[in-house]
Amino acid sequence: MSETTIVTTAAAGPTVNTDDYRSIWGYLRELDFRQGFIEAAGVRTRFAEVGSPDKPHAILLHGTGGHWETFVPNLGALSEHFHCVAIDMVGNGFSEKPDYDYEIAVYVQQILAVMDHFGMDRAHFIGMSLGAWVSAATAVQHPARVSKLILMSPAGLIATASNMARIRAERTAAVNNPSWESIHKVFEHLIADEENRLPDLVALRQAIYRRADTRESIDHLLILQDAEARDRNLIPEEQWATITAPTMVVASGKDHGEYQSTARTVAQVIPNSEVFEMADVRHWPHFEDPESFNPAAVAFLTK
């Protein structure tokens, strides 16, 4: 009788080039930071804190539907000079999502409460998109609380129907169907280079969009994409001109035209302002090219 030899092989999994693997933990793993939750203006607010409280303060604000992790490539460099607090704004990320519309005054109230909690009489503001809008509104309404501004992909001056419709459709589709593909599509509009759309980011946003409270509050979050609400929250050009804080405006060369136009207009209107050109990035310039952004931000804030 002949013998039969049975050879088994393990099923091959996906090939991963570990030499090139990138994660947000690559930025955080040696960083002395703290994540937690505080109550700010009645909202359970998620935050990340890094840097000594004895240093000048900096508040970091994300865009629509975002979370504090958008600033992970920047926290290390900034915390060498500043006490940084990045938050998930009300209705965003893993912060509380109360049952009312999130208009600019709601965000500003939360930010001031965060500053009070951390003992910040005044702070530098680093904001992107919605976060830049909130930062500028704070500078207009509460100038004594704002030292300097860095505005990236700024919103809050103009609004086109097409861009508002795009944001509403894109985010609503992703929340209604939080598949990897739909979430990844969101990042195509935020980050120009596919290599910078880190899987960690997609997975994190997917976890947020799968939450029941995100589905229940998405209309409150997207209220600023409705024309009437948007119009009553926009900052008129004459109010941008009252901003006294020195301001650096980041011009992202591959961003949507509305944001590029706003960046250049507010840079002309704000009296003490300058433009930092980043030609090869989209809506998240600080995340996509921290090697350029970080030294420029530190130089501006410390000079």
Image (cartoon, rainbow, N blue to C red):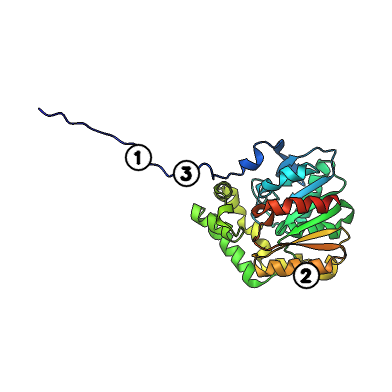
Q: How far across and down, in percent of the image, does residue 237 sit?
A: 81, 70
Depth check, front residue: 63 or 221: 63
Circle 2 residue? 265
Judging by the rendered image, the residue that carries numbered circle 3 is 16
Tell me the quarter of the picture where residue 162 sits: bottom right
The extreme front residue here reads 19
Quarter where residue 274 is shown: bottom right
Relative height, residue 25 to residue 62 (above, below): above
Query: Callout 3: helix, strand or loop?
Result: loop
In this rendering, the label closer to the viewer, 2 or 3: 3
User: 27 or 100: nearer the eye?
Assistant: 27
Horizontal side, residue 176 vs residue 279: left or right = left
Q: Which residue is mark 1?
A: 11
The amino acid sitting under disc 1 is: Ala
Q: Residues within 10 Å of mark 1 (few under 14, many from 20)?
A: few
Say whether disc 1 or disc 2 marks the residue closer to the N-terminus.
1
Kindly identify the amino acid type of the residue bearing the numbered disc 3.
Answer: Val
Q: Is residue 53 left or right of residue 214?
A: right
Question: For the point 56% across and 53% down, which residue is it?
Answer: 195
- Residue 179 in view: no
Of the two numbered discs 2 and 3 on the same chain, state the one appearing first in sequence: 3
Please report contact status of discs 2 and 3: CB closer than 8 Å, yes or no: no
Q: Which mark is nearer the camera, 3 or 1? A: 3
Q: Name the residue nearer the viewer: 193 or 189.
A: 193
Kind of residue indicated by mark 2: Thr
Q: Secondary structure at mark 1?
A: loop
